Amino acid sequence: MRIFKDGVTVGAYPALFLPTYRTLVISDLHIGFESSLSQKGVFLPQNSYAAMRHRIEELLGTTGSKRLVILGDLKHEFGKPSPQEWVEVKDLLETLGSMGVETHVVRGNHDNYVIAILSRYGVHLHESYMMIDHILLMHGHSEIELPEGTKVIVIGHEHPAVSSLDSSGARYKFKCFLVGKYRGKRLVVLPAFSPLSAGSGINEIDREGLLSPYLRESDIDKFVPLAVEDGIGIFRFPPIGLMRRIRKCDEMSDQVKGGHK
């Protein structure tokens, strides 16, 4: 599905492909998240990294991309990398190197202490943003002055998802792209690539609850979610504002029904 002139989705995966530039863009891998959870007493099978690496290899092969851009939060810990992070980040970089892929990382708020390992593997680290022609690529946790010529802004950080209820009242959450406007520019928010991040239900949180300043300063109600679900597909939801109004109507209807019991 085309998201903007130069950007398309790849199947039903949380990745953006720029065909003209043979570039694959992903965000928020949060490598080492299982280790962080285990320290808090939450134990998960240690297989999310393997699934991510396989998916990245598959997407690079499918698209024929020669360049991979990771929009921040390559690793999970804010501080020094955990042993798991060191091992898995090194493994990913070695894998990408063996594939001959030109790899770029735009620093996110979790990406401290990574410059040494990235430089060792010849990975380009961008402190705040990266430009590909008129496309501005960044993590999205802090605002910058938009470079001249910017027409499209692509960010991560928010981990967007959309929540929906079926007729039985069961709640579902789907990772999604968000597409809207920021200061007259096209703004695209990527879903988290990490399989452990279900994301935040954008249609259920207030403006103050949004993480990225780019979304807090935009009219979030006009943004359109494009949900991606492996095995199901990619599908377009109504604008966030309409989804919120529908939700309020449903809640009022439930209250009326409850009052008549």
Image (spheres, rainbow, N blue to C red):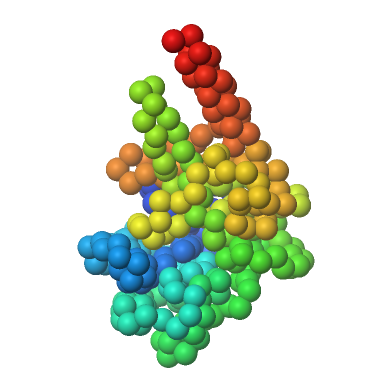
Tell me: residue 52, above or below residue 79: above
Q: Residue 252's x, y, as percent?
A: 56, 20
Please name whichever residue, 33 or 192, is drawn nearer the observer in this view of the structure: 33
- For residue 85, above or below residue 192: below
- Snapshot quadrant of residue 193: bottom left
Question: Where does the image place residue 136, in percent across and percent down from the top left?
Answer: 64, 64
| Residue 208 in sight | yes
Residue 169 location in percent, x, y? 39, 26
In-front residue for pair 18/219: 219
**Is 145 on the left or on the right of 122, as rendered?**
right
Q: Is residue 186 visible?
A: no
For image coordinates 56% across by 71% down, the residue present is 109
Give me the residue at 35% from left, 23% from top: 168
Q: Residue at x 53, y 24 (%)?
A: 251
The answer to whether residue 53 is left or right of residue 159 is: left
Residue 36: which quarter of the image? bottom left
Nearer to the camera, 104 or 33 = 33
Q: Quadrant of the C terminus?
A: top left
Q: Residue at x 49, y 36 (%)?
A: 236
Percent of width and height locating residue 4: 59, 48
